[in-house]
Every structure is written in structure tokens, then in C-alpha cells.
Image: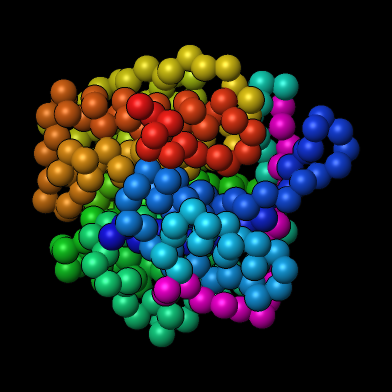
């Protein structure tokens, strides 16, 4: 079982090139969970879904795609909204409406245990940073890292405009990274975490914190990966881009799927991939992200789409 912890968000995105906005399921953790389930991996999600109409749509989307919501929480607060803006290149930008929404109110009881059979725990994005629930998320990550039984995966997915205390958010993310075996981040995330540092240097700083595998996505420049013994750059796949909504999350799903396939989704093995196997892992993640870029919105591929 792979378990994803974090928010489920309603994306309000431009429809048919006009001024109208269409509502789509989104949020980085939900996208990753759906991406994993579509790739055929048993996937559970720890999320806090609103009981209102939009929350029910988010829950239905996850269930329809085979995500196990047994451990998910229902909350009377409204769902979180994100208004999506698309550049002419298809690149996406987001304005979030977060105040008083369901996603951030984790309690210790709700995160007391992982779903049965969990071997990988992935988290990150806003749920790992926003109070009051972020402290409970950090406690869970620290606890699971200490046991050494579960691979802990972190995607910072930083949204600087949403952070009222950037310095505090940096400290929190770096503290979380100390309890992660795998960090997948964008080059923009690393530029925010380590201002002025080249990608390779920033990745090395995460390795110095104890992260065993660092993977950095770089858009059209491909990706970069670093372990104790291997560092390599991997090219992007040229595709006609409709938009980049959910592409990074699709890459994360593809990365975790490929690590399971390579028998490397464990704290003791994730940092031991040789160059050839690590390149295969990056190639799978790149393929999954590339397919997503050819589709509108966060619409990751099923395993059959990759054959």
C-alpha cells in the first residue's frame, strides 16, 4: 500500500478558452494518489474532505479512480479552491482560497496510525505547511521515519504567495526533509529553499540533511537525481503541451511507481540504485508526466496508456 497525505482541492480552470471557469478535482496530494491508483498501485489517501457539494465531488473523484479512502476524514468546513491561470505556453499559476477550509485541521487522533499495509508514505504541499494541522503532519513524518519501516517521500511543492511567514516555512520544510528518505522537488522549489544555489548544490544540501534520494524536476530541461553514489541529468520528452497542470504530481506518481517496480521503495534501498536503474526510474516518471502535459488539467495516465 502507498499512502498519500494531504489536501484535495477544487481547481477552477479556464474552460474552452473563454471567461468561464470549470471545476476540476485537484491538489497535489490528490493528484499523486489518483496517479498512483491509475498506474495500478494499491493507494490510500489521508485527506480531510468537506461534506459540502464540492467536497463530495473530490471524494467521488478519488473513489472513482480506485483510491482507498477508508482512513479519510469528513469535515463540515468548505473545500479549498484554487483559481488556475494559464500562460500561452500552457504553464499554470494558482490563486488559492484557503481560509476556514477543511484540509488543514488535522488532529493527533486522525493521524495516529497509517492505513494497514502502508509501505510508502508521501506528503508535502500546503498540508505540510499550514496551521493548525501542519504540526500533526510533522509528528507523523518524524514518527514513521524513526521506525525505519516505511519509505517517507516529500514533495515541497512550495506556493510562496500563500505563506505569511516564509522564513518559518523554510525551517519547517527543512525539518521535514530531515525525516524524509526521498525528496522530489521542482527547480523552483529549490530556488526558494536555497536562494542563489545551483540545482546541484541545493540537491546536495538536501542530501546532507539525510535524504537518500533527491529528484529535481526542471521542466523542459528534464530532471536531475542525486544519491550518495550517483548523480545524473535526464532529458525531458518533447510533447505537444496542452497545459502543465498536474505534471509535477504525475511525475511524482510515476517516480514512486517506478521505485516500487525496481524494488527500491524502502528506506534501505531507495538510495542504492545504480546509474542504469536510476535512469530507468527517471524515464518512467518522465513518461508519465509527459502524457499528462498532452491533456487538459490534472489527468494522469493509466498504466495501459504507457504501453
Image quadrant holding the C terminus, namely top left
Residue furthest to the top in view is: 238
Residue 275 location, x and y as percent? 16, 25
Q: Is residue 19 above or below residue 114?
A: above
Residue 21 location, x and y as percent? 81, 44
Q: Is residue 120 above or below residue 53?
A: above
Identify the residue at horizontal 46%, vertical 36% (top origin): 301
Render colour scheme: rainbow
Residue 211 seen in this snapshot: no
Residue 144 seen in this snapshot: yes
Identify the residue at horizontal 59%, vertical 21% (top origin): 241
Queried whether the magenta region covers residue 77, the answer comes back as: yes
Image quadrant holding the N terminus, namely bottom left
Quadrant location of residue 272? top left
Residue nearest the viewer, comparing 16 with 277: 16
Image-based side of 298 in relation to 13, left or right: left
Q: Is residue 31 above or below residue 97?
A: above
Residue 117 location, x and y as percent? 24, 67
Image-based side of 152 in relation to 37, left or right: left
Q: Which residues are magenta?
A: 70-87
Quadrant location of residue 228? top left
Q: How many marks?
A: 0
Residue 127 location, x and y as percent? 51, 62
Identify the residue at horizontal 49%, vertical 19% (top origin): 220
Queried whether the magenta region covers residue 14, the answer comes back as: no
Residue furthest to the bottom in view is: 109
Amino acid at each position: 500500500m502507498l499512502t498519500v497525505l494531504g489536501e484535495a482541492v477544487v481547481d477552477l480552470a479556464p474552460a474552452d478558452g473563454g471567461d468561464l471557469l470549470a471545476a476540476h478535482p485537484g491538489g497535489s496530494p490528490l493528484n499523486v494518489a489518483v496517479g498512483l491508483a491509475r498506474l495500478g498501485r494499491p493507494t490510500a489517501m489521508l485527506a480531510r474532505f468537506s461534506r459540502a457539494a464540492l467536497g463530495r465531488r473530490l471524494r467521488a473523484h478519488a473513489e472513482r479512480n480506485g483510491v482507498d479512502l477508508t482512513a479519510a476524514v469528513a469535515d463540515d468546513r468548505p473545500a479549498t479552491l484554487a483559481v488556475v491561470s494559464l500562460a500561452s505556453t500552457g504553464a499554470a499559476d494558482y490563486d488559492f482560497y484557503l481560509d476556514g477550509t477543511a484540509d488543514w485541521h488535522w488532529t493527533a487522533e486522525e493521524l495516529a496510525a497509517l492505513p494497514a499495509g502502508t509501505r510508502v508514505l508521501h506528503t508535502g504541499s500546503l498540508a505540510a505547511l499550514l496551521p493548525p494541522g501542519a504540526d500533526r503532519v510533522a509528528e507523523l513524518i518524524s514518527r514513521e521515519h524513526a521506525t525505519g519501516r516505511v519509505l517517507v517521500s516529500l514533495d515541497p511543492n512550495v506556493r510562496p504567495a500563500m505563506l505569511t511567514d516564509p522564513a518559518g516555512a523554510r525551517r519547517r520544510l527543512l525539518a521535514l526533509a530531515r525525516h524524509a528518505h526521498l525528496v522530489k522537488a521542482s527547480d523552483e522549489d529549490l530556488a526558494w529553499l536555497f536562494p542563489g544555489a545551483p540545482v546541484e548544490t541545493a540537491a546536495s544540501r538536501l542530501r546532507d540533511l539525510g535524504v537518500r534520494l533527491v529528484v529535481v524536476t526542471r521542466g523542459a530541461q528534464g530532471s536531475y537525481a542525486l544519491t550518495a553514489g550517483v548523480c545524473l541529468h535526464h532529458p525531458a520528452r518533447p510533447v505537444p503541451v496542452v497545459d502543465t497542470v498536474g505534471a509535477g504530481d504525475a511525475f511524482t506518481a510515476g517516480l514512486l511507481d517506478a521505485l516500487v517496480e525496481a524494488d527500491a521503495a524502502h528506506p534501505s534501498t531507495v538510495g542504492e540504485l545504480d546509474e542504469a536503474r536510476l535512469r530507468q526510474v527517471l524515464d518512467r516518471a518522465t513518461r508519465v508526466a509527459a502524457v499528462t502535459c498532452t491533456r487538459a488539467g490534472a489527468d494522469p495516465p493509466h498504466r495501459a496508456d504507457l504501453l
